């Protein structure tokens, strides 16, 4: 079946061209090193939701293997969220030994090696046997800061000590477009993560088009979505589009029950509530959810009643840490609890179908059989990601 | 309400031991270790009762369910786990044409309850 309006996005965005794209950026170690230094160490990267560190002295430790670094983001007594390298000023041990969320005691973060204690502003508060050091200038012994900022309750860090743009400037028109959705009300988070043996762009590409839904999701969403994209937006390095639902179809009994009890689910149709989407998003009646990519690697999908995200963080050229999260409002009753579980399980299964392609793609490309890939009009977000990465990689 | 909950539990008693599991990871393991007819039998037993079960449970406070209601709730969550396998995957215990399920590490956080 031919897609409707052939070439519509190529006509709208002629600067991206229509040629096949090269395979090398997915496999080349040299290219990856440039991506690491010029993209991932220069761009704002999402590390947390504010709800994860809701209280004073709550923190989260996030590893970034590509940077050989761990970052602590911590909420201060003044409610400010700050970021630091997880590296003690004494002899460089990790201050916090476990990744993930935690809570610092009243004294602050204490390094377990020799007991140096840091406050939430990174300042060193106490040094055991301080008198045994030589002219120790404690004012210069704080944790090394990492640029940290918050947009719509998403906490971002930037490894550039002096980022060229603030987070707001960096997100630009995409930040404005997605602002105002009630992200904070969806406080029930279901997370899946795994390490994928593939390049980060291969993984991200698989979630950046709807061309695959009739094949890959024939099992889980037999009549869920169309391959058509709505309202493609390329805003700086960021991009978004609407993914279309298919009308009709006869949901089987339990799927129907879930719809009936539900407040929200990716599989749900015919919502009659007033939309909670921002004004520029989802105005086509076929709109199922908005697929938005905050460059370089954070996908935010919003729809009425929930949202879900993907993040593809490179480990090295051949390995990627993937984390997918579904965010729901806490269920008010058993029916909603059941419905969330059903929608969440179905989406998990769809993600299992999606991730099944990625390692095979990477492996098959490694054979060297192909030097380029062919992209159709509906794969314009893939073309745009390659373009946006390439611009930074080739910048002086 | 408790009477209705207990009545449903009695009617579904052959399935309680296998399917009244409190975490999604446990339910997923149970599903992967079952076969099509076992999932179908549980599905056939609970699905026609679901409207009534949810109606009975909705009268109770979700955050504070008594043990018997919690058991019944967990049975419905197992239905959510297996329904796609009965309704979409022709009884296959695993998700067909999928990534290795055991490699997905699950984590559930409800920050409002932390």
Image (cartoon, grey):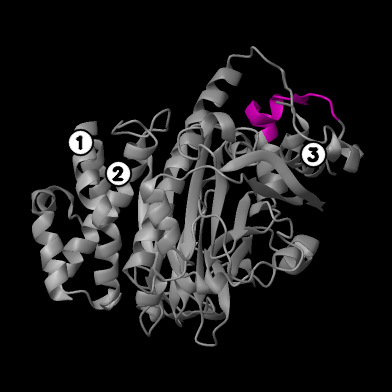
Please name whichever residue, A85 or A135, is drawn nearer the observer in this view of the structure: A85
Q: Residue at x 63, y 49 (%)?
A: A297
SS assignment at label 1: loop
The magenta stretch spans which residues?
A18-31
Q: CA distance from mark 1 to mark 2?
A: 10 Å
Callouts 1 and 2 close, C-beta under 8 Å = yes
Q: Dividing the picture into quarters, in which one does residue A5 lie? A: top right
Select label 2 or label 3 by which is in front: 2
Give the residue furthest to the bottom: A78
Question: Can you identify the residue that label 1 sits on?
Answer: B34
Most foreground residue, B41 or A138: B41
Q: Name the spot of residue A344 as percent of width and height, x first.
A: 42, 53
**In the image: residue A34, left or right of residue A363:** right
- Binning the other alpha carbons within 10 Å of mark 1 as few (below 14), some (14 to 19) or many (20 upward) gives some
Position of residue A325 in the picture relative to residue A25 (left or right): left
Q: Give the position of the C terminus of chain A as an image quadrant.
A: top right
Question: What secondary structure is marked by label 3?
Answer: helix
Front tag of 3 and 1: 1
Q: Is residue A12 magenta?
A: no
Q: Earlier in the sequence, mark 1 or mark 2?
A: 1
Measured from the top left, where is residue A202 in percent x and y?
Answer: 60, 33
Of A110 and A148, the residue lying toward us: A148
Q: Which residue is mark 2?
A: B82
Residue reaching furthest to the top = A369
Number of other residues with Cα within 10 Å of mark 2, as a class: few under 14, some 14 to 19, many 20 or more: many
Task: Describe the element under mark 2 as helix, strand or loop.
Answer: helix
In depth, the one of A334 and A30 nearer the eye is A334
Can marks 3 and 1 be said to lie on one chain?
no
Identify the residue at horizontal 37%, vertical 56% (top origin). Answer: A341
């Amino acid at each position: 079946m031919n897609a409707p309006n052939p070439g519509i996005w190529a006509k709208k965005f002629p600067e991206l061209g229509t040629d096949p794209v090269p395979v090398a950026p997915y496999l080349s170690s040299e290219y990856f090193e440039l991506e690491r230094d010029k993209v991932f160490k220069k761009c704002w990267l999402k590390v947390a939701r504010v709800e994860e560190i809701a209280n004073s002295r709550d923190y989260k430790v996030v590893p970034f293997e590509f940077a050989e670094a761990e970052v602590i983001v911590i909420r201060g007594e003044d409610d400010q969220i700050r970021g630091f390298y997880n590296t003690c000023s004494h002899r460089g041990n990790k201050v916090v030994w476990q990744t993930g969320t935690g809570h610092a005691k009243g004294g602050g973060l204490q390094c377990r090696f020799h007991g140096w204690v840091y406050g939430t502003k990174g300042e060193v508060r106490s040094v055991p046997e301080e008198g045994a050091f030589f002219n120790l200038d404690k004012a210069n012994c704080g944790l090394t800061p990492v640029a940290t900022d918050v947009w719509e309750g998403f906490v971002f860090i930037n490894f550039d000590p002096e980022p060229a743009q603030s987070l707001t400037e960096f997100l630009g028109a995409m930040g404005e477009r997605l602002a105002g959705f009630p992200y904070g009300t969806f406080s029930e988070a279901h997370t899946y993560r795994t390490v994928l043996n593939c390049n980060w762009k291969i993984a991200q590409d698989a979630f950046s088009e709807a061309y695959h839904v009739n094949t890959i999701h024939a099992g889980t969403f037999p009549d869920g979505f169309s391959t058509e994209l709505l309202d493609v937006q390329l805003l700086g390095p960021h991009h978004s589009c609407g993914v279309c639902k298919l009308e009709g179809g006869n949901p089987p009994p339990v799927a129907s029950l879930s719809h009936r009890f539900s407040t929200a689910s990716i599989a749900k149709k015919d919502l009659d509530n007033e939309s909670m989407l921002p004004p520029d998003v989802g105005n086509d009646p076929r709109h199922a959810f908005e697929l938005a990519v905050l460059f370089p690697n954070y996908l935010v999908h919003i729809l009425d009643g929930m949202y879900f995200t993907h993040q593809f963080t490179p480990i090295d050229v051949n390995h990627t840490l993937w984390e997918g999260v579904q965010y729901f409002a806490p269920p008010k009753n058993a029916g909603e609890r059941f419905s969330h579980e059903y929608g969440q399980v179905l989406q998990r299964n769809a993600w299992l179908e999606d991730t099944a392609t990625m390692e095979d793609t990477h492996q098959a490309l490694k054979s060297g059989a192909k030097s380029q890939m062919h992209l159709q009009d509906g794969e314009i977000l893939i073309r745009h990601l390659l373009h946006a990465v390439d611009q930074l990689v080739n910048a002086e | 309400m408790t009477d209705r909950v207990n009545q449903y539990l009695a009617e579904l008693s052959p399935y309680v031991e296998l399917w009244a599991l409190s975490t999604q990871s446990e339910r997923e393991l149970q599903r992967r270790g079952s076969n099509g007819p076992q999932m179908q039998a549980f599905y056939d037993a609970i699905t026609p009762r679901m409207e009534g079960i949810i109606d009975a449970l909705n009268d109770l406070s979700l955050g504070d369910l008594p043990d018997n209601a919690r058991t019944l709730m967990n049975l419905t969550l197992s239905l959510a786990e297996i329904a796609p396998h009965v309704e979409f995957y022709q009884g296959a215990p695993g998700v067909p044409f999928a990534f290795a399920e055991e490699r997905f590490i699950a984590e559930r956080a409800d920050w409002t309850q932390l």
